Amino acid sequence: MHFCFSGEYTPRSLNNIMENPTTNRYEAAKKLIEAAGGKLISMYSTATDGPGVMVIFDVPDPSFAPAISGVVVAAGAMQNVRLVRLFTQDEIKVVRQHATKLKTAYTPPGG
């Protein structure tokens, strides 16, 4: 299953990066994700709301995704994190088919 992890570096992390600007955070992310049996798909630096990252990764067991996020946050490396499950087009097709079958079972407020 694919996930997108995004967040901002903490001030401590930013200071450490500035002290060693050639540090390779990609390798650190890759090592953590691979330890969970996953694969790092891509990693981008972001500037919105403070310097940070966006990492797209794949893990066979979805319970590893919040574990990965928790490890990074608990280490004090990131703040204001988001973890989003991403769906492939084949997966979302199945979701849409399920929604079509279920829509008659739901009554909205006032309906």
Image (spheres, grey):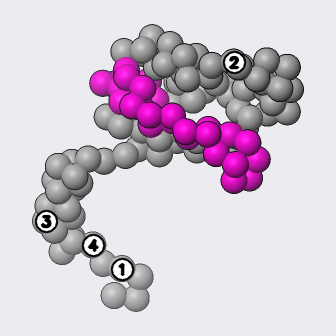
Where in the figure is residue 57, as x and y percent of width and height? 41, 31
Mark 1 is on which residue type?
Answer: Pro
Residue 7 can be seen, yes or no? no
Look at the numbered disc 2 and give the secondary structure of its residue: loop
Whichever of callouts 2 and 1 sits on the residue coming sooner in the sequence is 2
Point out the frontmost of discs 1 and 3: 3
Look at the numbered disc 1 and give the secondary structure of its residue: loop
Whichever of callouts 3 and 2 sits on the residue coming sooner in the sequence is 2
Point out the frontmost of discs 4 and 3: 3
Q: CA distance from mark 1 to mark 3?
A: 16 Å
Whichever of callouts 4 and 2 sits on the residue coming sooner in the sequence is 2
Neighbourhood count class around disc 4 (C-alpha, 10 Å): few under 14, some 14–19, many 20 upward: few
Point out the frontmost of discs 2 and 1: 2
Q: CA distance from mark 4 to mark 2?
A: 52 Å
Point out the frontmost of discs 4 and 2: 2
Q: Is disc 1 in contact with disc 3, using a CB cutoff of under 8 Å?
A: no
Mark 2 is on which residue type?
Answer: Thr
Q: Which residue is located at x 68 percent, y 40 percent? A: 52
* Above/below status of 23 relative to 73: above
Residue 33 can be seen, yes or no? yes
Report how many numbered discs are placed on residues in the image. 4
Nearest the eye: 14 or 62: 14
Quarter of image, res 109: bottom left
Give the label on residue 101, or none: 3
Q: Which residue is mark 4?
A: 106
Region of the chain picked out in magenta, as a range: 38-65
Q: Which residue is mark 1?
A: 108
